Image: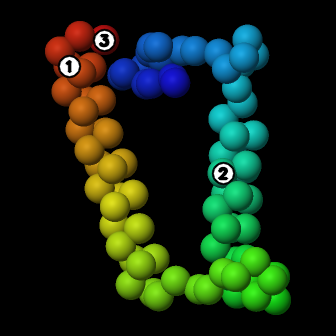
Amino acid sequence: MPMLCGRRWIFRTDIMGQRTNALWMGAHVVIGSATALIVPFTPFAEIFGFSPLPTVSFLLIGVIVLLYVIAAEITKTVFCKKVKF
């Protein structure tokens, strides 16, 4: 996974021998997430036995993701200062 330290990329890796396009991957994540959030509110939900989550669950998931991103950024900053990139 690429990581930006200052102005340099470190740990640049390839997936299955090909460089990944961040925009392409981001689009798939957004489309997949949107689909997962919308399906319980469609007629397909009854067929598959899905039910919508309560609003509190969505808020809790959002807070957890936000805290994860903050923790990852803090860890990255500490690592980059220690390695002096």
Q: Is residue 23 left or right of residue 52?
A: right
Q: Residue at x 64, y 73 (%)?
A: 37
The amino acid on which the numbered mark 2 sits, given as a three-letter code, is Val
Total labels drawn: 3
Instruction: Judge by depth and name the residue closer to the eye, 76 or 59.
Output: 59
Residue for badge 3: 85
Q: Residue at x 70, y 26 (%)?
A: 20
Tell me if label 2 and label 1 are in contact, CB under 8 Å. no
Q: Picture coordinates of residue 47 (x, y %)?
A: 81, 83
Q: Picture coordinates of residue 17 (x, y %)?
A: 73, 11
> Disc 1 and disc 3: Cα gap in Å?
7 Å
Q: Picture coordinates of residue 9 (x, y %)?
A: 48, 17
Tell me if label 1 and label 3 are in contact, CB under 8 Å. no
Q: Picture coordinates of residue 53 (x, y %)?
A: 52, 83
Mark 1 lies on a secondary structure that is helix
The amino acid on which the numbered mark 1 sits, given as a three-letter code, is Lys
Q: Earlier in the sequence, mark 2 or mark 1?
A: 2
> Disc 2 and disc 1: Cα gap in Å?
30 Å
What is the quadrant of residue 50 in the picture?
Answer: bottom right
Q: Earlier in the sequence, mark 2 or mark 3?
A: 2
Q: Is residue 35 visible?
A: yes
Residue for badge 2: 29
The amino acid on which the numbered mark 3 sits, given as a three-letter code, is Phe
Q: Is residue 34 left or right of residue 10?
A: right
Mark 3 lies on a secondary structure that is loop
Please tell me the numbered disc located at residue 81.
Answer: 1
